[in-house]
Amino acid sequence: MTDLSEKMHKPETVCIFGTGDFGCSLGLRLLQSGYNVVYGSRGPKNSLLLPKGSNVMTHAEAACEARVVFVAVQREHYGFLSSLASDLEGKVLVDVSNNLRRGLYPESNAEYLSRLVPGATVVKAFNIISAWALQSGGLDANRQVLLCGDCSNAKQQLMDIAQSLGFTAVDRGSLRAAADLEDLPLQLFPLWRLPLNIAICLTAFIFFYTLTRDVIYERVTNGKDIAFRIMVSLANKAFPIVSLVMLSFCYLPGALAGFLQLYNGTKYRRFPDWLDRWMLCRKQLGLLALAFGFLHVLYTLVIPIRYYVRYRINVYTISLVKDNKTYEFDNMAAWRYDSYYSMGILGFGLFVLLGITSLSSVSNSLNWREFRFVQSKLGYITLLLCTAHTFLYGWDRFLKPSSYRWWMPPAYMLSLVVPCVVLILKLILITPCVDSKVTRIRQGWERQGKTSANGRDTKTNQPLMA
Ligand code: NAP
């Protein structure tokens, strides 16, 4: 009985090769979590900054002390491990290494390690966790430990360690996935790059367009300096336009994909790469669109307290008094402005809902149907409301020749092009005859005589000749 309880409470020993930043932080965390830690170092006597309670010895001695050995050494120094092959026989070797850039080596570091020490079982893990995250126990950093390896027992041991360190372990498959895991820390917001570039280009274009049309035109033709409008008026023209165009960019690839499937007569054909990439960053496009929408709301809220607006109202009121005139109530204008504000408020409200449900913590609690309902159905309603809001803003301005300064239409008219295209495409896709065809294709139906995914004629199952 005493033997058993002693065995149950005997702390497990973990070995770490390398006494650098990562090795030290990992050792500290392991000690805090109740493990014994032994370090394998080239100079055991020189290693003075190790966490209290750990032991340091030569690599060979340390390897004999534990079943699990973390290799916290840069890949270019792995050479010494082949001379320790016999000491590491049967051990679980954990590769935590990262590279400075992609494609530096022909094989992943973990596969290289496995080749160097064939008698050991290699698991790739902890490489996306920083030394800092280890010290803070994942409290204010990434908590996920992605791991991969060919032996499920070895992976389970690592999962147990990760869990007792306060992390969540995620199995990413066999050691062949190691290259992908090693690429992860080298990525810098890969899915945000395209949406950010679109947002920057669109904002710059709309800003210079409105600057030319509103400010420079006024200066050149009437000699009036209204450059002060750049700060609020022009910004408040650019932001809603970027927001609306980017929101429609979220739905355009889906509509294009529907038409492409109709054209191909099958869903088993790959979409072009550009469409695939576009579809992958729809969430980021939407969140950026929401951010611009939010800026528009903030800028709109300050309109009544702007000096220029108060000045115009005062001048107008005084002129009415002077001329003894009355400000007539215009029923049509009341309807128009109230509808305009109402569409904007409802559109923005739904837009916020879309943004919230796209966050992983919220979308994880929805089933697929609920998620689709919010992102697709409510998404299109949001686009419709925001487009109506813009139409009401413009009202009949498109009929007035004075709106076309230097033959340039008002910017709001440009902003309506993409949303209208998307809404028209969607309208076509949801008409019963088209919708039933798309639904059948999405359920696996293929048009006879079309090339299927394997490049064969679906009628004859023969390869199609060029
Ligand atoms: P480091 O501070 O440079 O430490 C590496 C350790 O490797 C040294 O302290 C040294 O320990 C040992 N070493 C150096 N040259 C050696 C050689 N020629 N032969 C054998 N051992 C040698 O590096 P680190 O930041 O701790 O990173 C270690 C590994 O963890 C790297 O592969 C890195 O990609 C990975 N990693 C680091 C972080 C991080 O936040 N730092 C995050 C994720 C992954 P001894 O003097 O005791 O032998």
Image: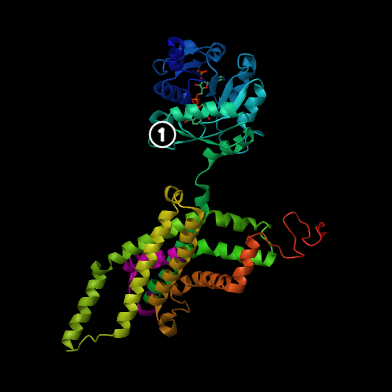
**Which residue is nearer to you in this view: 357 or 203?**
357
In the image, residue 38 lies at what x, y percent?
48, 15
**Magenta stretch containing residue 236, yes or no?**
yes
**Which residue is nearer to you in this view: 348 or 201?**
348
Q: Secondary structure at mark 1?
A: loop
Q: Which quarter of the picture shows residue 68?
A: top right
Q: What's under tag 1, amino acid-wise?
A: Gly
Q: Residue at x 21, y 79 (%)?
A: 315
Q: Is residue 210 above or below residue 84?
A: below
Residue extending farthest bottom: 324
Query: Badge 1: how crowded within 10 Å, few (<14), some, or many (20+)?
Result: some
**Magenta stretch containing residue 196, yes or no?**
no
Q: How is the image coloured?
A: rainbow
In the image, residue 326 lies at what x, y percent?
20, 87
Whether residue 292 can be seen here: no
- Quadrant of the drawing holding the C terminus: bottom right
In the image, residue 136 lies at what x, y percent?
38, 31
Q: Residue at x 49, y 69 (%)?
A: 419
- Quadrant of the drawing holding the N terminus: top left
Residue placed under numbered mark 1 in the picture: 138
Q: Residue at x 51, y 61 (%)?
A: 250
Q: In this picture, which residue range is highlighted in magenta?
A: 219-244
Q: Which quarter of the picture shows residue 135?
A: top left
As drawn, is 441 to the left or to the right of 240? right
Q: Which quarter of the picture shows residue 104?
A: top right
In the image, residue 447 lies at what x, y percent?
72, 65
Whether residue 177 can be seen here: yes
Residue extending farthest front: 1
**Which residue is nearer to you in this view: 33 or 103?**
33
Q: Main secondary structure of the magenta part?
A: helix
Q: Residue at x 34, y 72 (%)?
A: 342
